[in-house]
Amino acid sequence: MKPEHRAYRTVDGNVRVGSVIYGIGAEIADPDGWIWTLTETMDGSRGLNQIAAEVTARHPAVTTATVCSAMADLWEAGFVDDAAAQVPPELGDRDPIRYARGVALLRWMDLKPEASAWQAQLRLHRARVVVLGVGGTGGAAAQLLVASGVGHVHAVDPDVVELSNLNRQLLYREKDIGRPKADAAVTALRSLNSDVTVTGQPLEVRGPDDLMTLLAYGEGGPYDLLVLGADRPAEIRRWANRVCLALDLPWVEGGYRGPLVTAGVHVPGEGPCWECQRAGESERRDLRLGPGQSEDAASPRMPWNPASAVTAALSGTLVAHAALALLSGVPPMEPGFRYGVNLMDLGDPVIQRHERRPDCPACGGRPSRRPDLN
């Protein structure tokens, strides 16, 4: 049994495995007590045949085939891993120390059979990610991706570090003021984790063609994911949606509108695209606008977003969590939704999910790989 999923016996004799966290744990009826014996015996010190022999010796009415079937069920449910599995040789010598706590968390959340507890970390190691916009949201996300062992992170931003950035863009220091953000970000990220590849580029994306060039022709091979931290120009998410549909490239994005902090998760061909989601959410909200009024009347746009270190870091954390989930497969995440936190009311969690729209101008009624980019 995974150490994080260690079983315990309830007062009525059932066996609970997988911890008491919602979405992970399970309860197994055990009227004869042999399931409890099985989970106690599966402590990583015995092979399959020895486990079956010990359980059947203590419970003669139970057959070897039944015990093996139960072990297979526990394996398929994700509660078991191979205690003898080695760290994949593709990972570095320092990785078992650096990522030990993170691998334990991935193992805890992973409910599918894996050859090794390190498989999810290996998928992160092999991943290549572009972070477009390394300000508050993107800078925090980039830090978390690099710390988590994503193999190649490419940081893109056209701006320079300014004093006004430092209340929320925690990637930078006072000594960075006046430096290009892409350069300062690369320096900071490499100092955080020298065992991954970090590159940077001071590129301004002025249209979908610029974004297509950035994502389609990555140095060293294709990218696996776009992390969009930029919020300017206003059309940037629409461009990202069209380009990522064209490239069949998953992407995540996030940000903050005052105390409302959210992240969106998008995978072409799986669920609604960003434009489906936006249209669905616009229909869901009843803003009671008068004729000719735009949504800006209800939620005004400012030259810059009011933000703090908390909102920026929180949005980057939500984005990074989604990115790591898509790259590693842990936890499983069905794309095509938006989630977040309302800091004015923590009892009001944000979950927005809408259906894919057949009339969507980006993904509806056409192949997902080559939509119109404009």
Image: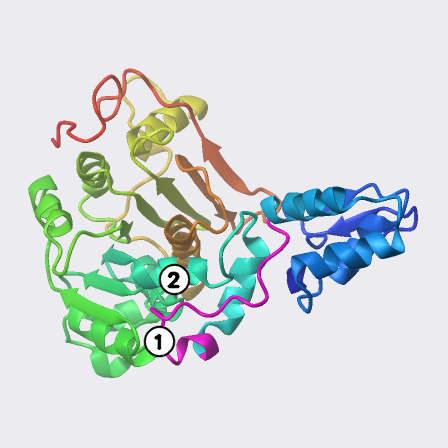
Percent from the top left, x then y, of residue 294? Answer: 29, 27
Whether residue 274 is visible, yes or no, is yes
Name the residue nearer the viewer: 338 or 215.
215
Q: Earlier in the sequence, mark 1 or mark 2?
A: 1
Q: Horizontally, is 250 left or right of 31 in the view?
A: left
Which residue is label 2 attached to?
A: 122
Please, is residue 249 above or below residue 359 in the view?
below
**Magenta stretch encompasses residue 107:** no
Q: What are the residue bounds of the magenta stretch?
A: 78-97
Real-space Cα separation, disc 1 to disc 2, in angstroms = 10 Å
The percent position of residue 369, horizontal first and vertical second, equals 19, 31
Q: Nearer the viewer, residue 42 or 356?
A: 42
Q: Residues within 10 Å of mark 1 (few under 14, many from 20)?
A: some
* 84 within the magenta span: yes
Residue at 25% across, 63% down: 153
- Contact (Cβ within 8 Å) of mark 1 with mark 2: no
Q: Residue at x 11, y 63 (%)?
A: 202
